[in-house]
Image (tube, rainbow, N blue to C red):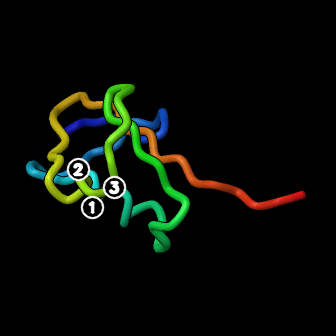
Amino acid sequence: MDVIINGEPRQVAPRTTVAEVVRTLTRSPGGVAVALNDEVVRRADWAATVVAENDRIDVLTAVQGG
């Protein structure tokens, strides 16, 4: 199934969840925010939110610095 993750075309298995997408990108879920088709997905909903064909998923991570 084709989706766009952080602006890059990717393929994921059918029934892939937002939580699974996040796990492919980062090992630390802390400081991570996700938008699915420009709508923020609450962390509590990641495991229950299934991505669909042609969805756009943006996974943003906080960066520390001074």
Taking the image as shown, residue 44 lies to the left or right of residue 33, namely: left
Q: Are marks 3 and 1 in contact (CB under 8 Å)?
A: no
Q: Tell me the number on the disc at residue 43.
A: 3
Q: Amino acid at mark 3?
A: Arg
User: Relative to residue 53, is residue 58 drawn left or right?
Assistant: right
> Which marked residue is nearer to the observer: mark 3 or mark 2?
3
For badge 1, the amino acid type reads: Glu
Residue 49's x, y, as percent? 17, 47
Q: What residue does disc 2 label?
A: 12
- Pointer 1 residue: 20
Amino acid at dot 2:
Val
Residue 12 vs residue 25, the one in the foreground: 25
Q: Residue 54 is drawn in which quadrant?
A: top left
Q: Is 56 drawn above or below residue 29 in the view shown?
A: above
At label 1, counting other C-alpha atoms closer than 10 Å, the crowd grade (few under 14, some 14-19, many 20 or more) is: some
Which of 47 and 12 lies nearest the eye of the viewer?
47
Q: In the rendered structure, which disc, 3 or 2, sits on the residue that comes first in sequence?
A: 2
Residue 43, percent across and down? 33, 55
Confirm or deny contact between disc 1 and disc 2 (CB under 8 A): yes
Circle 1 — which element? helix
